Image (spheres, rainbow, N blue to C red):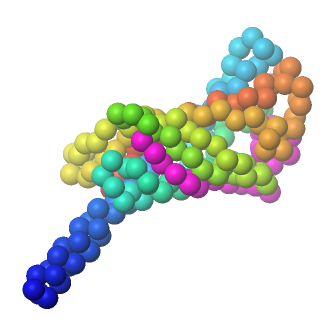
Amino acid sequence: MKKLFLFFIAIAISTASIAQTKWTVDPMHSFVNFSVKHMGISFVDGSFKKFEGSVDAPKADFTDAKVNFTVDVNSITTGVEMRDNHLKTDDFFNAEKYNKMSFVSSSFKKVKDNTYALAGKLTIRDVTKDVVFAVVYGGSAKDQQGNNKVGFAATTSINRLDYNIKFDPTGAGIAKDVKIGLNLEFTEVK
């Protein structure tokens, strides 16, 4: 009886260790984008070209996954060099002093089917605030090298003034609300 009990404990431990899966972002197939209204009539879109991220998933359906993500602020691009340089100044990101933005999850919950709510702490400059991303799980596949891949799209909106980005505090020229969109592909770490 004792051997049978130890056998079941060994199976439970090995199953638990197999179930924990780590994923890292594939920067070649991922995008970190933002959009902000300009003068109340149009939108300026931009992106960050350098970032890192990981997902630690204790369950196959990703519920309760832990997500960590950092963005290199100096990699910002809007297609206009003069604007990009201004965004790196203290008027906006102060990239010299605060060269990274970060997100650390506190929960990843399934809402319905392939949609999730990802809650956590977003840090921009010297401010950390709670945010919730609406996430769509795109699915999984194997690439040509046999690596396991998963895809997600995540969106949220933040008020830039909450993060000490005080340029144009009225929001007349540059809106206060910034839409953030991430299209992410992750590779399983073996």
Q: Nearer the viewer, residue 57 or 53?
A: 57
View extreme (bottom): residue: 2
Q: Residue 187, image x and y in percent?
A: 35, 52
Q: Residue 120, image x and y in percent?
A: 60, 50
* 120 to 136, vertically: above or below: below
Residue 101 shown in magenta? yes
Quarter in which the N terminus is drawn: bottom left
Q: Residue 125, image x and y in percent?
A: 77, 51
* 13 to 18, vertically: above or below: below
Q: Nearer the viewer, residue 13 or 146?
A: 13
* 179 to 40, vertically: above or below: below
Quarter in which the C terminus is drawn: bottom left
View extreme (top): residue: 41
Q: Nearer the viewer, residue 5 or 87?
A: 5
Query: Residue shown at 39%/34% (left/top)?
Result: 112
Query: Residue shown at 64%/43% (left/top)?
Result: 131
* 51 to 31, vertically: above or below: below
Residue 160 sits in quarter: top right
- Is residue 72 something that shows in the picture? no
Magenta-tinted stretch: 85-110
Residue 152 shown in magenta? no
Query: Residue shown at 23%/72% (left/top)?
Result: 12
- Is residue 114 something that shows in the picture? yes
Q: Residue 189, image x and y in percent?
A: 34, 61
